[in-house]
Amino acid sequence: MTSTDTQMRLLIIEDDRESADYLVKAFREVGYVADLASDGEEGLALADTGDYDVLVIDRMLPKRDGLSLIGTLRDKGNRTPALILSALGQVDDRIKGLRAGGDDYLPKPYSFAELRAAGAHVGSGSIVATGANADVLELAELLTRFCAGEACGKTIPCRIGTRRIEEIATRINAGTPRPTDADLLVDLSADIVASALCDHERLTTLPMTSVMRYFRPELDAKLQSGAEQTAGRQRVAVAGGERRTEAPTP
């Protein structure tokens, strides 16, 4: 199958034949190039070898379920945006999908307008150009602070969670991270995206989650440096306490 450079290429991984035919037909009618896989193993093989802009993945698949498929792709370094479709639509289900590496989660039943909008969102992006010596984590902190400041705060994750992400970024850049900060970033981001009322909430998580996904060595270096500085301060404090304890009494 050939496509022009302007066409978005989708891989639809769906085992229900009626749903699969509907998705392929609908996406092709609006100008997308859409390939189809009917089980998890076939989907994994095509996603590994194909040059796709977006993966549309049913969660409950034969041979390999959708979350396992996405996790395997992420472990291999495949970062193609993934939209998860599922009849499991509770917040906890959405959080599990996002933690597995999905970029968005659409509960069934859905309209094609919702699906197309979600696919366009997942398949879109922006590029920030910086100098070669720019600190990507400091840039992520700046972008997070801006997005948190612009958030309307209509939901608790939006109102509080975005500020917590900003605080984590500030701690990391200041050299005072906490041991749980990396895991907390993942959990907060998943909660915000799962409960978001608008795209701004979802996008607020992107600066730091992009750092975790694409600049993990830089993040780990700052986390390690901060941990070593904290341990050094603790040793000095302990040593100082021992000196005070051993000092002669008048």
Image (spheres, rainbow, N blue to C red):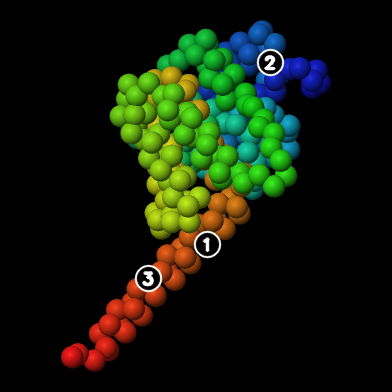
Q: Secondary structure at mark 1?
A: helix
Specify whether residue 229 is in view.
Answer: yes
Quarter placement of the C terminus: bottom left
Q: Residue furthest top?
A: 29
Amino acid residing under circle 3: Gln
- Closest to the camera, between mark 1 and mark 2, is 1
The first of marks 1 and 2 along the sequence is 2
At label 3, counting other C-alpha atoms closer than 10 Å, the crowd grade (few under 14, some 14-19, many 20 or more) is few
Q: Secondary structure at mark 3?
A: helix
**Whole-Å distance between the Cαs marked 1 and 2?**
46 Å
In the picture, measured across the screen, residue 28 lies left or right of residue 172, that is right
The first of marks 1 and 3 along the sequence is 1
Q: Label 3 belongs to which residue?
A: 234
Q: Label 2 belongs to which residue?
A: 32
The first of marks 2 and 3 along the sequence is 2
Specify whether residue 38 is in view.
Answer: no
**Whole-Å distance between the Cαs marked 2 and 3?**
58 Å
Q: Secondary structure at mark 2?
A: loop
Quarter placement of the N terminus: top right
Amino acid residing under circle 2: Tyr
- Residue 231 percent across, percent down from the top left: 42, 69
Image point (69%, 47%), residue name:
133
Image point (80%, 18%), residue name:
4
Give the total of numbered labels.
3
Image point (50%, 50%), residue name:
173
- Residue 157 percent across, percent down from the top left: 34, 31
At label 1, counting other C-alpha atoms closer than 10 Å, the crowd grade (few under 14, some 14-19, many 20 or more) is some
**Whole-Å distance between the Cαs marked 1 and 3?**
14 Å
- Residue 217 percent across, percent down from the top left: 61, 54
In the picture, measured across the screen, residue 131 lies left or right of residue 141, that is right
Q: Which mark is residue 225?
A: 1
